[in-house]
Amino acid sequence: MDDQTTSSGSEAYTIQGRSVTFPVNVRHATAGSATYLVPTEPARAMLPISEIEIAEVLPGKALLSLAIIDYKDNDLGDYNEVSVAFFVKLRGQSGVPYLGNIVDMLKSRLGTCITHLPVDQAFTCEAGSVIWGFPKTVQQIDFEYAVDRASCKLVYDGRHALTLSLPRGGNKSLPESTLTGYTSIEGVAHRNDFRSGAEGFGVRLGGAELTLGEGLIADQLRSLGLPKRALMTTWMEKMYASFGPSLKL
């Protein structure tokens, strides 16, 4: 990997012989998520940087998001992805305890920290790791679609890690908004802002079916009390997004 400066003064990266410039655009992805209420202490131990903290929504309770994404038209390629993430905020950030975090989460104002982000293509793995610090690895990820449900199976290092099935469908538009994620690049905390919206958006109480297998991800999810009923699930038939460069905290 090499990075360089473009004629406009913005940073560019060369990944596997290909130039990556900003913004990096996702024009079409199909995505779903399940949100779970989990204990704070084991969640806190999984965060990779000290500059952030779990955004508790109840005393001793955190929010975990499991997401499955099928990228169809993306500057980084056509690939599948699974995300394991917690809702977080900057350490010491003020606000109304618990209820304020719930409101911020519903309004897409809480940050996230991804602890695992397996993908099934090498180029996006290297680009995501180098440019934004995402914890990507190349694994086997397979989607199956039915009219009213979608299922994603993750095989991690040759072993079945999890299968997540979600309700599919929605007729709402999700307005474009700015979201923030926190990562670590070579031990330095970074902030990643991106804009995202969707068509064919749906949200439901519960609805997720999660099966856990073997390995690190499965073991960590079990330590958080999963599998259990999800608080809610979301579906985006057509998600779009735009990513800028990563910024040091």
Image (cartoon, rainbow, N blue to C red):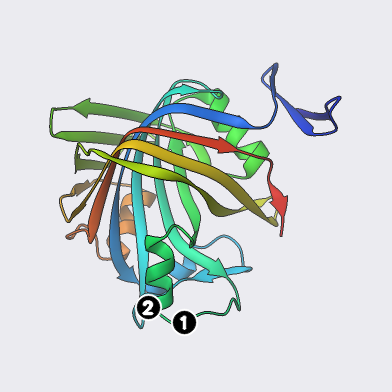
Please state the horizontal and vertical placement of residue 108, each as a whole percent of the image.
44, 57
Residue type highlighted by circle 1: Val
Q: Position of residue 32 (x, y in %)?
A: 30, 41
Q: Quadrant of residue 191?
A: bottom right
The N terminus: image quadrant = top right
Query: Which sits in the foreground, 191 or 45?
Result: 191
Q: Residue at x 39, y 74 (%)?
A: 40
Q: Quadrant of residue 78?
A: top left
Q: In the rendered view, would you say 27 is above or below 37? A: above
The circle on residue 241 is none
Which quarter of the rendered picture does the C terminus lie within?
bottom right
Residue 105: give x, y in percent of width and height: 41, 63
* Label 1 secondary element: loop
Label 2's element? helix
Q: CA distance from mark 2 to mark 1?
A: 6 Å
Query: Which percent across, then down, holds residue 27?
Result: 47, 26
Is 126 left or right of 146, judged from the image as shown?
right
**Which of these two is toward me, 4 or 123?**
4
Determine crowd level at label 1: few under 14, some 14-19, many 20+ residues with C-alpha closer than 10 A.
few
Quick check: can you spot residue 38?
A: yes
What amino acid is found at the position of numbered circle 2 in the picture? Leu
The residue that mark 1 highlights is 96
**Residue shown at 31%/51% (left/top)?**
218
Sort mark 2 into few (<14), some (14-19) or many (20+) by Cα contacts within 10 Å: few
Residue bearing mark 2 = 99
**Between 92 and 135, which is closer to the camera in this rendering?**
92
Q: What residue is drawn where x is 48% and y is 68%?
A: 45
Residues under numbered marks 2 and 1 in contact, where contact means CB atoms less than 8 Å apart: yes
Relative to 206, say whether 91 is above or below.
below
Of residue 144 and residue 9, the one placed in the foreground of this image is 9
